[in-house]
Image: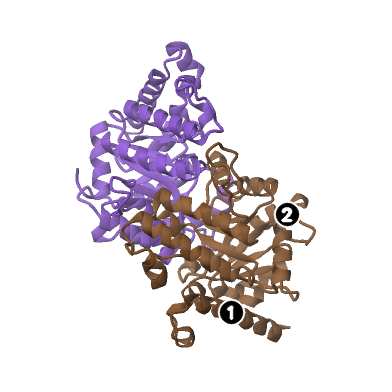
Chain colours: A purple, B brown
């Protein structure tokens, strides 16, 4: 394992032969019945039962996907809703993912300035050296909201660079109303998200942040649903890893998403969350594998990888 | 206590006769020696000792300020850096603040869409009905980052409205580089922050969100350092509470900040954090009160209230 996040990601994408990442957005009521029932404590209103079931589900899911994908994206909101119990579970899963050799993106979307940003960075980008938290590990990278400008990105970038970690700054999100703010344009037609991308690049493109792979540890988040327009960012910022949400359930196609990859297949992480982790809800997998929810998830990952590989083939 | 956040705030500002709020940004190394030492466990690298000292300091500080100010602002980053132990402490302090009759603003700056936003809202705007978390209370309002547009604000506003809680959406922040993004202007000269304010107002100005005080439970964050220009938002959006950070340590004057208040003294919350909670570090208070850190904090609150009241007098 190299110490530079961008290089670790590069190696992982090359070795797993895919830019697909799996997002963990665990919702108790959607967990497989086998997980919810096996302890006879199927109670969504009991915090211990809920986080225990979520931990079990996520761990088993990660074991299935770990040999097939370079990274997972953990959405902290689904843990934070169980208060400190959920946060403890979030970090416990990071340790499990680390053991499985996965790169871990903490989808936390934090954003602030100065000491506050430094404190968030301590929570998410630096393994704690605190008595009582000896074995706690943080994620390999996090998502950050850049609405504060440079002041809100630099403190995170500083800690990330010192710790061999990474960032993905929100540039263009995949939701419908993103256009109102992110496509807001100046008199020359430059859009807000293009301006944010430029600010991110000024921070990303510094020698101390570029790894031997040629990529920076400071990347961008650009939704797959806007790929038709935003994929020009790929060539404009060749040193940036681009995290692409929206593939699968949110409606972006493989052809759209793959636009963010370079010809060698690196440079983008195409994330699918619900379409993979809840594959057992889909008739196509249910009919084939019955109650074997793990086999459903495994097949969904294989199908997504093939889908992306085919799209890549067509593009080249 | 009425069930509408904006009305509770209105009554609290009226009864405490000030728009001053105190921000809790606790940093272990800056806590009074008396707090750090009294258990002979002065160890910033021991998580239990650190959060215990922080809990003690914040509780005592809240007892001092509670009779004098309508609300406190708790910055979650300073708790999150102690992982789940810090998060448990954050919620424990919310319960203490509630007992003291303070309105509690959770300065969490979360931001996301759909189910993710709903999950964050469950963590911060709805008291949990979960076995194992029976007595846990959430804050009265939170700060939210609006970079996603309407999709990123509505889910929070929905939960807040249902629960008698509130929001403050980041419109214009107080840091220097905020200008790069938030002052980005379209061909008509409309700036990004003005556009965001308009989007926030569309959500805020709905009948179900307006209390008997005439204010909405969905407000804005506008930094005091940009008041010269941004205080026009006050008249433009008369139904919005405006949370104004930057008074005190960050350099905004009382005259600047008070621009966001209406003539009756309501409509804005002027927040001071470090200049009050670390008052005992300042020569002016140290000389007067020696090691009595509580008396220093008390006097700093009194001085800030007088400073704001004088500025208000001059304005009228």
> Where in the figure is residue A227, as x and y percent of width and height?
46, 42
Horizontal arrangement in the rendering, residue A50 relative to residue A242 (left or right): right
Q: Nearer the viewer, residue A154 or A263?
A: A154
Which residue does the image show at 50% across and 44% down from the upper left? Answer: A83
Question: Which chain hosts label 1?
Answer: B
Residue B269 shown left or right of residue B108 in the figure? right
Looking at the rendered structure, which numbered label has been put on residue B247?
Answer: none
Give the residue pinned by disc 2: B4
Q: How far from the left and from the top, in percent, is residue B224?
A: 57, 73
Quarter of the image where one finds residue B29: bottom left
Label 2 element class: loop
Residue A199, located in which quarter of the rendered image? bottom left
Residue A41 in the image: x percent, y percent? 50, 25
How many numbered marks have been drawn onto this rendered protein structure? 2
Ranked by sequence position, the earlier of labels 2 and 1 is: 2
Residue A152 visible to an observer of this rendering: no
Image quarter hosting the C terminus of chain A: top left
Residue B188, x across and y down, in percent: 62, 65
Q: Residues within 10 Å of mark 2 (few under 14, many from 20)?
A: many
Looking at this view, is A201 or B236 the one in front? B236
In-front residue for pair A143/A41 = A41
Q: State whether residue B253 is above or below residue B105.
A: below
Q: Please give the name of the residue rendered at 73% of the width and 57% of the height, measured from the top-left corner.
A: B1
Residue B238 relative to residue A26: left or right: right
Rendered residue at 19%/43% (across/down): A1
The reply to the same-chain question for discs 2 and 1 is: yes
Q: Residues within 10 Å of mark 1 (few under 14, many from 20)?
A: many
Vertical position of residue B298 compared to residue A228: above or below: below
Judging by the rendered image, the residue that carries numbered circle 1 is B304
The outermost residue toward the front is: B39
């Amino acid at each position: 394992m190299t110490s530079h996040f961008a290089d670790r990601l590069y190696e992982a994408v090359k070795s797993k032969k895919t830019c697909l990442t799996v997002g963990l957005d665990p919702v108790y009521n959607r967990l497989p019945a086998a997980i919810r029932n096996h302890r006879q404590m199927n109670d969504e209103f009991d915090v211990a039962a809920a986080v225990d079931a979520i931990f079990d589900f996520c761990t088993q899911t990660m074991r299935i996907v770990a040999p097939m994908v370079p990274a997972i994206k953990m959405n902290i909101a689904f843990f934070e809703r169980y208060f400190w119990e959920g946060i403890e579970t979030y970090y416990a899963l990071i340790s499990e993912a680390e053991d499985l050799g996965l790169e871990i993106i903490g989808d936390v979307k934090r954003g602030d300035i100065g000491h506050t940003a430094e404190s968030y960075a301590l929570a998410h980008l630096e393994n704690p050296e605190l008595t009582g938290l000896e074995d706690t590990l943080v994620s390999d990278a996090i998502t950050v909201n850049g609405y504060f400008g440079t002041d809100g990105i630099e403190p995170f970038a500083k800690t990330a660079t010192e710790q061999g970690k990474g960032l993905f700054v929100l540039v263009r999100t995949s939701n419908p109303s993103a256009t109102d703010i992110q496509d807001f344009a100046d008199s020359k037609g430059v859009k807000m998200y293009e301006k944010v991308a430029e600010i991110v690049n000024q921070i990303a493109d510094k020698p101390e942040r570029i790894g031997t792979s040629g990529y920076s540890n400071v990347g961008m988040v650009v939704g797959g649903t806007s790929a038709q327009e935003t994929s020009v960012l790929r060539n404009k910022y060749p040193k940036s890893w681009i995290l692409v949400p929206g593939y699968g359930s949110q409606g972006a196609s493989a052809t759209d998403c793959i636009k963010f990859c370079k010809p060698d297949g690196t440079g983008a992480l195409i994330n699918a969350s619900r379409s993979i982790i809840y594959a057992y809800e889909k008739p196509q997998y249910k009919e084939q594998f019955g109650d074997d929810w793990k086999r459903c998830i495994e097949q969904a990952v294989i199908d997504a990888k093939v889908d992306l590989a085919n799209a890549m083939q067509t593009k080249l």
